[in-house]
Amino acid sequence: MKGIIVKCLQELVVEKFGQDKWDVIAAKVGDMPKTITPVSDIPDEKDMQALRATCEVLGISLQQVADAFGDYWVNVFSQKYYSIYYEKRKNAREFILYMDHVHDTMTQDMEHARPPRFKYEWKDDKTLIFHYTSHRDLIDLAAGLIKGVGKFYKEDLKVKKISDKELEVIFP
C-alpha cells in the first residue's frame, strides 16, 4: 500500500491523541519507517498492523478508527493534496460516483499502486449500492470515507455495510 494511508493515520493520531500515542502504535507495528511519504511503499501487513494497533492503543473499534480516518482524510488531510477533486464536484453524490476515476487517475503512474476499485448500482433514486473490490478487505475505511464526504458537502448520508464487498449509501 502507498504510504499516504499510514501518513494520514499518523497525522490523525498525533493531532487528536498526541505523538506519544503514535510512538506506541509505531512500536507495536515494528519496522515502521521513521519518515513516511505519500508515495512510500508500505507492506500491506504493516498497514493492517497499524490499524489494529491504533484500535488497541486508543481503545476503540475498527469502525471507530475507520470513521475517524474517513473524516480526517476527506476534511483535513486530502484538502492539502487533492482539494481540486472536491472543488470540481457540487455534492456528495457527484464525488462518490467519481471516486473510482480518482483512484484510477491518481495511481496510473505510481509503481506498485493497487488501489481499491468501485462500481455503482442504483437501488432507487436515493439509494446507491457501492461495490468495493480490493485484496485488502478495508470496506470499513471506504464507509468512513463516504461518511467524511457527506460531512464535507454538508449532507446527511446514511451508510450501511451490507457485506465485506458492498455498502448501501442513502442520499438525502
Image: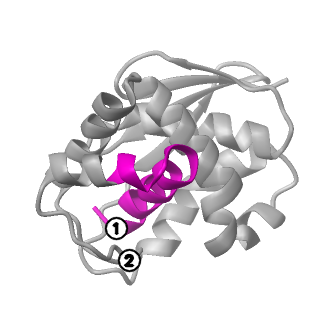
Specify the quadrant that holds the C terminus: top right
Instruction: Decide which of 159, 125 is in the foreground and name it.
Output: 159
Q: Over which residues does the magenta segment extend?
A: 1-22
Q: Which amino acid does label 1 sit on?
A: Gly
Question: Label 1: few (<14), some or many (≥20) within 10 Å?
Answer: some
Q: Which amino acid does label 2 sit on?
A: Thr
Specify the quadrant that holds the N terminus: bottom left
- Percent x, y of residue 137: 29, 36
Of helix, strand and loop, which one carries label 2? loop
Residue denoted by label 2: 37
- Of mark 1 and mark 2, the one earlier in the sequence is 1
Q: Residue 84 carries which label?
A: none
Residue located at (43% from left, 31% from top) = 140
Residue 131: tell me if it is visible: no
Residue 70: tell me if it is visible: yes
Main secondary structure found in the magenta portion: helix
Question: Are circles 1 and 2 on residues that touch, CB within 8 Å?
Answer: yes
Residue located at (22% from left, 71% from top) = 33
Question: Label 2: few (<14), some or many (≥20) within 10 Å?
Answer: some
The residue most toward the front is 20
Instruction: Decide which of 13, 162 is in the foreground and name it.
Output: 13
Q: Give the quarter of the image for residue 82.
A: bottom right
- Percent x, y of residue 151: 77, 38
Whether 108 is among the magenta residues is no
**Marker count (numbered):** 2
